[in-house]
Amino acid sequence: MGTYRPDSSTLLADDSILEYVLETTVYPREHERVRELRLITQQHPLSFMGSSPDQMQFFSVLLKMMGAKNTIEVVAIDVSREYYELGRPVIEKAGVAHKVDFRAGDGLAVLDGMLDGAAGTFDFAYADADKLQYGGYHERLLRLVHVGGVIAYDNTLWGGSVAMPRDTPGSSEYDRVVRDYMLEFNAAVAADDRVEACVLPIADGVTLCRRVK
Ligand SMILES: C[S@@+](CC[C@H](N)C(=O)[O-])C[C@H]1O[C@@H](n2cnc3c(N)ncnc32)[C@H](O)[C@@H]1O
């Protein structure tokens, strides 16, 4: 049986492997403003919620490979404005504030509001908001990205718990609820003929879905 990794930053067998990747490949080429944003975020008591830097580097490479221009992040859509405000000064200093259209509100409701007028216009979407709404995000994001566009879901292996018994020691009741949800979500994505999907064992598990119809 595998080891439950509730910290969500890596599913690698040992943290030293993640440190190796970060120190050799991620941090040396990290943009100065991205580093600033990362260091500010790390001071926050909820910093564990931040997506892993190696995963973000992967997205950066992927988006450039895709030539993606128009993207949605169900976090640039956020019920809380506080987290966006934390990073906004750095986004402004980087000169890219005009590219970020923050929408305060519930992810499902904001996505619903975008369907009229923006359907099929996005190249890439990233969902890392309410874990128990992934099925709802999927239906809406599939309409918002064009055929050939990509949707990424974070935390789909939930500390490895999807492959472990429900009562694995160290898991909370919330962990068990999310584990059960991810089991259903992962099965639904695997059977969804509108997408070509794969699961990457990076960070806490990332599912990529390429819209094919
Ligand atoms: C895991 S964090 C995202 C971290 C982000 N990927 C990063 O690297 O900084 C989850 C975010 O989802 C937001 N959230 C939770 N429920 C939401 C909902 N129903 N609609 C929109 N955002 C929600 C939280 O406020 C939080 O900012």
Image (cartoon, rainbow, N blue to C red):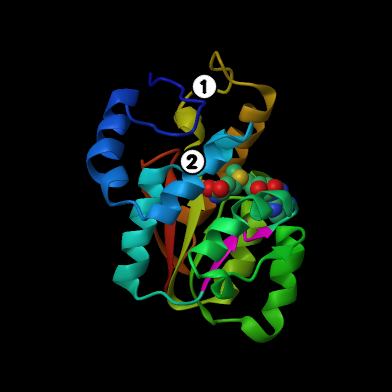
> Residue at left 66%, top 66%?
102
- Using the image as rendered, state which of residue 5 and residue 60 is in the foreground: 60
Q: Residue 165: percent from the left, percent from the top?
A: 52, 21
**Label 1 secondary element:** loop
- Using the image as rendered, state which of residue 122 and residue 141 is in the foreground: 122
* Residue beneath disc 2: 39
Span highlighted in magenta in the image = 71-77
Q: Amino acid at mark 1?
A: Pro
Does residue 82 appear to the left or right of 156 in the view shown?
Answer: right
Q: Amino acid at mark 2?
A: Leu
* Residue beneath disc 1: 165
Residue 31 visible to the viewer: yes
Task: Name, please, the residue furthest toward the front.
Answer: 93
Instruction: Quote the CA–CA distance across marks 1 and 2.
Output: 36 Å
Q: Main secondary structure of the magenta part?
A: strand
Q: Residue 25: percent from the left, percent from the top?
A: 24, 45
Residue 130 visible to the viewer: no
